[in-house]
Image (cartoon, rainbow, N blue to C red):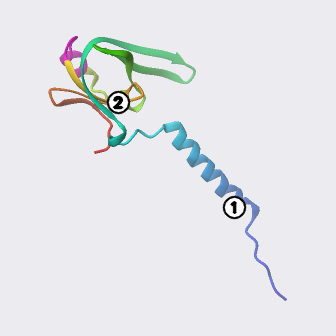
Amino acid sequence: MTEETEAPVGSSAIIILLIAGAIALVYYLKLPPSESQLLTQKAVLTNVKWQSQYRKGGTDYWLELSFLNYKNIMTVKGVNYSRLKIYEFKNEINYYDTLTIKYKDNNIYFLSKNDKPYISSVNR
């Protein structure tokens, strides 16, 4: 008499759900780009807008920045916003200051003034 061992159907379903969950999590979190994917630029700040949007389940906050000679509005949002040194930013950065930014698709991932970082979420 031979006994065949079969994996229970439940364990296959669990593995599939774990893989699908991992893929969804990576897509949802949108891991930040690597250092080599970012553009670095020195830019003169012309406008700052602190934004928020109420939604079911919480409030989203982000920062919109405008720069001289750059037509698009740049944003600091999500994880990058949570890493922003807000108090220092508000007290030490003024209009027409020259900032160093690292960005991709109008999203700022690194921001500094005179080599002092105010936001840094780039893996070094």
Helix, strand or loop status at disc 1? helix
Quadrant location of residue 52?
top left
Q: Which residue is mark 2?
A: 103
In the image, what residue type sits under mark 1?
Ser
Quick one: 90 or 94, which is closer to the camera? 94
Q: Which residue is mark 1?
A: 11
- Say which quadrant the N terminus sits in: bottom right
Residue occupying the point 76% across, 76% down: 5
Quadrant location of residue 70?
top left
Residue lying farthest to the right in this orientation = 1
The span shown in magenta is: 88-97
Residue occupying the point 55% across, 19% down: 55
Whole-percent x and y of residue 75?
Answer: 38, 22
Residue 86 - label: none
Q: Is residue 124 above or below residue 52?
A: below
Q: Say whether residue 64 is magenta.
A: no
Whole-percent x and y of residue 53?
Answer: 49, 16
Contact (CB < 8 A) between labels 1 and 2?
no
Residue occupying the point 57% across, 21% down: 56
- Distance from disc 1 to disc 2, alpha carbons, whole Å, reads 43 Å
